[in-house]
Amino acid sequence: MSISDSVIQGAVTRYYREYDRYLKLCVRVAEICRLEIVEGNAIRAQVTSRAKSPKSLEGKLRRFAVSGKKEFPDIDSVFDQIRDLAAVRIATYEQKHEKQIAEEVCKRFAGHDGENATLEVKDRHAEIHLIFIGRHTAKCSCQPLNLLEPTSTSVVSRVKFRCAA
């Protein structure tokens, strides 16, 4: 089996504990995108965000268990491989703005370990997968990497962007 029931239950339990962090992360990143990227460049676009529900995560893991398409030997591997626990979508009204939005997102946010963010083209739309490393603060439990220094108490979160017209 690609993922055991105990790993599924452990991952879902952990995600329930961390769910608020993912909600705050995607809301904050969406706010930055709306203000700095969309409004800052006078682009007509709609910015939405969501954190995957714990029930949805469980369903996804159970589908992987049945299909055997991915291996998840432990709970940490679930969080390392699942890329859509938090997502921000920027839907442009005109297709000509897709590339500009994608470039601005890559410029604004750093990828894993401060590297440049990566851009993938999927189904004719740009997808950007960013890994955010943050630390607990009084105001927000996780902030983008380029806003603070990672510490030994860092947490890792991913945000998937989809730019579509």
Image: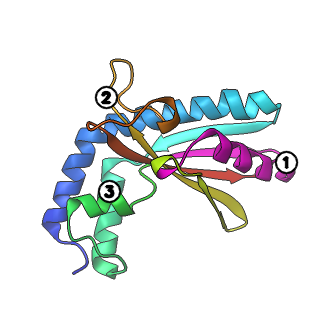
Q: Is residue 142 left or right of residue 72?
A: right
Residue 73 rendering spot, x and y as whole percentages: 21, 71
SS at mark 1 in the image = loop
Q: Say which residue appears at 75% left-offset and 28% top-offset.
A: 39
In which quarter of the view is residue 150 placed? Answer: top left
Q: Which residues are magenta?
A: 87-112
Looking at the rendered structure, the secondary structure element under dot 3 is helix
Task: Name the residue nearer the viewer: 41 or 117.
Answer: 117
In the picture, the disc for residue 136 is: 2
Tell me the quadrant of the picture where the N terminus can be found. bottom left
Eye-nearest disc, 2 or 1: 2
**Circle nearer the N terminus (3, 1):** 3
Return the residue nearer the eye: 88 or 143.
143
Which labelled disc corresponds to residue 94? 1
For label 3, the residue is: 79
Is 50 covered by the magenta stretch? no
Q: Position of residue 53 (x, y in %)?
A: 37, 47
Q: CA distance from mark 3 to mark 1?
A: 34 Å
Q: Are marks 2 and 1 in contact (CB under 8 Å)?
A: no
| x and y, in percent, of residue 153 in the image | 26, 36
* Amino acid tagged 1: Glu
Up-down relation of residue 70 to residue 143 (above or below): below
Specify few, some or many for label 2: CA neighbours under 10 Å numbering under 14, 14-19, or 20 or more: some
